[in-house]
Image: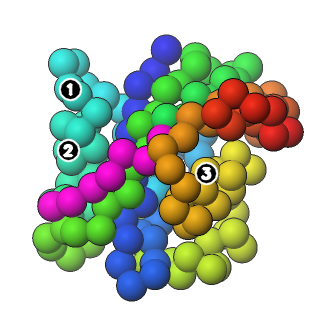
Amino acid sequence: MQLTTLCYIEREEKYLMMHRVKKKADINQGKWIGVGGHFEKAESPEECLIREVYEETGLKLKQYTFRGIITFVTDVQPTEYMCLYTANAFEGTPRQCDEGDLAWIRKQEIMDLNLWEGDKIFLKLLIENAPFFSLKLCYHGDILQHAILNGKQLK
């Protein structure tokens, strides 16, 4: 199994998004996602979050909120458990990233981007300020087959 973090950094009704266009053999190629990545040995979710955000953006998080846990099940890679965060206080200015292009995207325009279908579900929950949630997303290839929110089938 894989353990990861993902963060949507907020500023003026916008999220900092990464358009994944630079990394070779990227499962997220061409998609827009938040910033984050894989846990390193002995890291807590918060340590991974802070390190990954800094590595990918140059920003130092000052305030963040653990919003949910996402379980990704797919036929092409091991199950992934992702700790989902938002952050609204940080220091620094975003810098170039070798995994993709960073851009501040208005929340009302996010659903128009090239997103994973399951990401649309949790982004809607973030934008609506839903309480902490558990979301299981089951994919066959790139196609979302099932979505289960807090134990209840959505799709």
Say what amino acid the circle numbered 1 marks. Answer: Glu
46 or 104: which is nearer to us? 46
Up/down of 81 relative to 9, above or below: above
67 or 48: which is nearer to us? 67
* Residue position for label 1: 43
* Residue position for label 3: 122
Q: Which residues are magenta?
A: 62-68
- Expressed as whole percent of the image width and height from the top left, the position of residue 91 reads 14, 70
Determine whether, in the image, residue 56 is placed left or right of residue 18. Answer: left
Label 3: how many Cα within 10 Å (few below 14, some 14–19, many 20+): many
Q: Earlier in the sequence, mark 1 or mark 3?
A: 1
Spatial separation of the CA atoms under disc 1 and disc 3: 24 Å
**Is the residue under label 1 in contact with that under label 2 (CB below 8 Å)?**
yes
- Expressed as whole percent of the image width and height from the top left, the position of residue 60 reads 15, 60
- Which of discs 1 and 3 lies nearer the camera? The answer is 3
* Residue position for label 2: 51
Residue at the (20%, 26%) spot, across then down: 43
- Expressed as whole percent of the image width and height from the top left, the position of residue 21 reads 53, 58
